[in-house]
Amino acid sequence: MIVINSKEVKPDDRPGDALLKTLFPKDIIEGGKVMFGTVVIPPKARVPMQGQGSHEQDEYSYIIRGTIQTGSGGKEYTVSAGEATLIPAGEEHWAYNAGDEDCEIVWMLVER
């Protein structure tokens, strides 16, 4: 078993206001296909800051706290605490916190 204390993990070096932490990179075990982490998106912050992002893995997310507006696959959604999302690999997406409290998300990227 590998145990990670998220308070001891340094944030990823990425631009913008969001606090992104990768707790388990895919290479933590040989042949790994999953990355796991958290992101805190403060009020009025957008990820990415401009345009849309995508990646080669399926993205599973669970909203722990707050609400986020997001676009994925050409549609817009509002997702709140207690809800989960799945963004298929390669699908462009973005997120914006229009609220007045942080939005905290647990995410997982899974290679097919």
Image: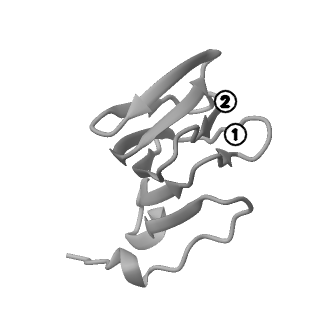
> As rendered, which of 42 and 16 lies closer to the eye?
42
- Distance, label 2 to label 1, CA atoms, is 5 Å
Residue 90 percent across, percent down from the top left: 62, 31
- Residue positioned 60% across, 70% down in the render: 12
Other residues around mark 2 within 10 Å, as few (<14) / some (14–19) / many (≥20): some
Give the residue furthest to the top.
75
How many numbered marks, from 0 up?
A: 2
- The answer to whether residue 112 of the structure is visible from this angle is no
Which secondary structure lies at badge 1?
A: loop
Query: Residue 3: which quarter of the image?
Result: bottom left
> As rendered, which of 16 and 112 lies closer to the eye?
16
Callouts 2 and 1 close, C-beta under 8 Å = yes
Residue type at tag 1: Gly
Q: Which residue is mark 1?
A: 53
Residue 108 percent across, percent down from the top left: 41, 49
Left/right of residue 60 with respect to residue 88 in the rendered view: left
Q: Which residue is mark 2?
A: 92
The C terminus lies in which quarter of the figure? Answer: top left
| Nearest to N terminus: mark 2 or mark 1 | 1
